[in-house]
Amino acid sequence: MTKSYASLHEIKSEIAIGKTTVEKLVKGYLAKIASNTHLNAFNEVFGDEALANAKQVDARIKQGTAGRLAGMVIAIKDNICYKGHKVNASSKILEGFTSVYSSTVVERLLAEDAVIIGRCNCDEFAMGASNENSYFGPVKNHADQTKVAGGSSGGSAVAVQAGMCHAALGTDTGGSVRQPASFCGLVGLKPTYGRISRHGIIAYASSFDQVGPITRSVEDAALLLEIMAGTDAYDSTLANVEVPSFSNNIKKPGLKKIAYLQEALSSPGVNAEVKDTLVKYIDKLRAEGHTVKPIAFELLEYLVPTYYILAMAEASSNLSRYDGVHYGYRSPNAVDLLSTYKKSRSEGFGKEVKRRIMLGTFVLSAGYYDAYFAKAQKVRRLIREKTEEILKEYDFILIPTAPEPAFNLGKKEKDPVVTYLSDIFTVQASLTGAPAISLPTGNNSKGLPLGLQLLTKHFGEQELLNFAKYFLEL
């Protein structure tokens, strides 16, 4: 059985002394996947292919020609295209669809000799905070199977948490890498919007979506970011900025100024043990000589409504392409073109996706565009300006990743608004496009993982990673 390695460096060290091989690692992970099918983390496992690829990587390691990710066995979220493989976004409407090309991130991982072991379950079209909105059923948390894995990249997080792969890719639209990483005791990084290509990522909300790694160590997150980032002719929203060697430049930071949201400690909606964890780390940072001060973020109550108005509007537009005509699911009950559209979409999309499409269509409709969508765009700008103002004075903003630890499966099904509010601390980075990282901070009294989040200025990933590594060692 493959042990859980803390970092790729550890794996490479064992490969170098002949203690293991990539093929042995893959066999171990496949055995783990087989014994953990009840967690429902994978929609498909590429078993034979992963083993064949592992043998090739082992041969390149012997020849001394292997890439930087040789030894890393990785899983990808089911909304990331991989040529010749099915991709469903965990939705019935993409049933049987096979990707005809690979996403840029997949191409870059494969070029550096990563082995992709399978595609992970997620909330349908990445819409959800609990991984219960999947056509393939919910993902269960490895720490407690009565609890959610977090969403929407819950399968990716549980795959790493339960040792079914070394690292995984998720996508973060409103917190979908950071929140499941927090619920599963892992590192979850959302890079600056425009840092990593979105080419080949099934779109949910195009001005928010960003690929991010879920790992056990900050070093692995840094290496994956370094390899995936950078310009791409297929994505015009990418920023033309230099990609530093993040993984080689991680060093101990000097004294920093850190702001924390006082609402995170005063709000009755935040779990007591989450508050205690935040206080504990504030005290640790102060003891180390850092300046840590509370700030009021008067726009806090507007974060979630602004995010959902804009994200649902973009979802309504992006998901209009799934019509039952071109590809994917087509209703067998359709009799003409109109009924093909209506029945295919009604039967193909799940409840939450339909809710978001309808709300998005409503806020974009002629009579309500100015009242909702245009106003939300203005509030988004205010939120960004306020956040940037704080980050001119402070190096980082420290906040909980989620207001509570992993909650019970089925708990929030009845009231979607309650589920939306669980994004209260993650959507600030999403609305502003800023980079943020969720870091594991131990478990609560019931053994459930907790996480805190650091947010910094645009393209400040190197400083963020430096401080994140130091933070985990406090």
Image (cartoon, grey):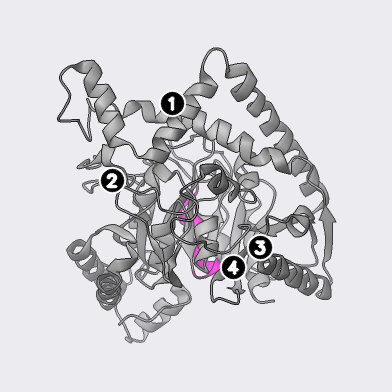
Nearer-the-camera pick, 48 or 453 = 453
Indicate the amino acid at tag 1. Ser
Residue 168 sits inside the magenta stretch? no
* Other-residue count near label 2 (Cα within 10 Å), few / some / many at <14 / 14–19 / ≥20: many
Q: Which mark is first along the chain, 2 or 4?
A: 2
Magenta stretch: helix, strand or loop mostly: helix
Indicate which disc, 1 or 2, sits on the residue closer to the N terminus: 2
Q: Is residue 133 visible?
A: yes
* Above/below status of 21 relative to 449: below
Q: Residue at x 80, y 72 (%)?
A: 283
Are dots 4 and 3 in contact, CB under 8 Å?
Answer: no
Residue behind mark 2: 87
Identify the residue at the far top of this view: 366
Residue to which mark 4 is pinned: 450
User: In this rendering, is residue 415 above or below 337?
Assistant: below
Q: Which of the marked residues, 2 or 3, is nearer the chain's N terminus?
A: 2
Q: Where is residue 214 shown, x and y percent of the image?
A: 47, 61
User: Residues at badges 2 and 3 in contact (C-beta under 8 Å)?
Assistant: no
Residue 49 left/right relative to 384: left
Kindly identify the amino acid type of the residue bearing the numbered disc 3.
Asn
Whole-angstrom CA distance, mark 1 to mark 2, is 20 Å
Closer to viewer: mark 2 or mark 3: 3
The residue that disc 1 covers is: 317
What is the distance, in whole Å, between disc 4 and disc 3 at their CAs? 11 Å
**Region rendered in magenta:** 216-229
> Which of pointers 4 and 3 lies earlier in the amino acid sequence?
3
The percent coordinates of residue 270 (x first, y second) are 68, 58
Q: Secondary structure at mark 4?
A: strand
Q: Give whichever of discs 4 and 1 has the lower sequence position.
A: 1
Q: Nearer the viewer, mark 4 or mark 1?
A: 4
Look at label 4 and name its amino acid. Answer: Leu
Q: Which residue is mark 3?
A: 271
